[in-house]
Amino acid sequence: MEIGLVVCEFNADITKPMEERAKAHAQFLGAKIGKIFYVPGAFDSPIAVQNLLEKENIDAVVVLGAVLEGDTDHDLIVAQHASRKLMDLSLQFKKPVTLGISGPKMTRLQAQERIDDYAKRAVEGAVKLLKRLE
């Protein structure tokens, strides 16, 4: 099985370690990372996911990002709209798209504490779904 990774560059101190853990966990589970697509932030991820889902060799897409709490509700808007569109794309293309985006309403410290869990769970979710959808 071949997985595409979409990695958000915003909050790279969090997302770069998430990427490394996701790659290691995919290898551990016997999945190949076929392509990595970098986007500025979580809000920008749907177009990259669509690009990857259109590729015949990509069986699933894992999205990694961190949406941190700010002074406004911007983090809520970004997370809600990105996650809704990612689900829509998964249904449209009939391929798993898993959400490894931590947040909203999360501090930087909380995001750092969740690096391992979110990266691994997103990859594991994609692999499990692929096996169950066969």
Image (tube, helix red, strand yellow):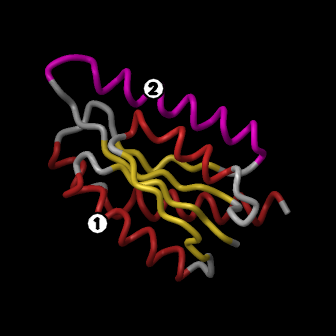
Q: Main secondary structure of the magenta part?
A: helix
Q: Secondary structure at mark 2?
A: helix
Q: How many numbered discs, if any? A: 2
How packed mark 2 is, by other alpha carbons closer than 10 Å (few <14, some 14-19, many 20 or more), is few
Furthest toward the top, the residue is 72
| Mark 2 to mark 1 CA distance (whole Å) | 23 Å
| Front position in the image: 68 or 12 | 12
Residue 64, relative to residue 106: is it above or below?
below
The amino acid type, in three-letter code, at marker 2 is Gln
Taking the magenta stretch, the answer to whether it contains residue 86 is: yes
Q: Which residue is located at x 41 percent, y 53 percent? A: 64
Please say if the residues under marks 2 and 1 sit with CB atoms less than 8 Å apart: no
Is 25 located above or below residue 13 in the figure? below
Disc sitting over residue 51 in the figure: none
The residue drawn where x is 30% and y is 51% is 9
* Part of the protein shown in magenta: 71-94
| Mark carried by residue 17 | 1
Residue 71 percent location from the top left of the image: 14, 20
| Residue 47 on the magenta segment | no
- Quadrant location of residue 112? bottom left
Q: Mark 1 falls on what kind of element?
A: helix
In the rendering, which numbered label is found on residue 80?
Answer: 2
Q: Say what amino acid the circle numbered 1 marks.
A: Pro
For marks 2 and 1, the one nearer the N-term is 1
Vertical placement of residue 50 versus 124, above or below? above
Q: Is residue 112 left or right of 116 when viewed as pictured?
A: left
In the rendered image of this protein, does residue 121 appear above or below residue 48? below
